[in-house]
Image (cartoon, helix red, strand yellow):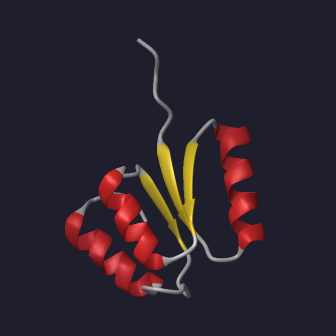
Amino acid sequence: MERVAPLILIVEDEPKIASLLEDYLRSHGGYRCRTVSRGDDALRRFRVDPPDLVLLDLMLPGIDGFVLCKWVRDESYVAV
């Protein structure tokens, strides 16, 4: 059986930072990554494809990182 790499949800509104994180995680750990730039998009993505880890910026358009973190904590035990 083939092992499925852990999924990391990157929530970052700065494209260069998001790209750097995604490139590093894919090449140095073989992780699967999903990147979104808005807090409200992160909520939708989290519900559709729950990640194993969330890398979360705090200052985001839509829903800020503090509110998003609270929601994740209320709904899941995933690492943030």
- Does 11 appear above or below 65? above
Q: Residue, x 30% and y 59% (percent of image)?
A: 47
The mark tally for this picture is: 0
Residue 31: give x, y in percent of width and height: 58, 41
In the image: residue 78, left or right of residue 28:
left
Quadrant location of the C terminus?
Answer: bottom left
Residue 3: give x, y in percent of width and height: 46, 22
Residue 36: give x, y in percent of width and height: 55, 66
Residue 63: give x, y in percent of width and height: 42, 85
Q: Residue, x 21% and y 66% (percent of image)?
A: 75
Q: Residue, x 31% and y 69% (percent of image)?
A: 72
**Which of the pair 18/45 is nearer the observer?**
45
Say which quarter of the image contains residue 28.
Answer: top right
In the image: residue 65, left or right of residue 67:
right
Q: Most extreme residue toward the top, as rendered? A: 1
In the image: residue 30, left or right of residue 40:
right
- Does 61 appear above or below 17? below
**Which of the pair 44/5 is nearer the observer?**
44
Q: Residue, x 73% and y 50% (percent of image)?
A: 24
Quadrant location of the N terminus?
Answer: top left
Say which quarter of the image contains residue 57.
Answer: bottom right
Say which quarter of the image contains residue 79.
Answer: bottom left
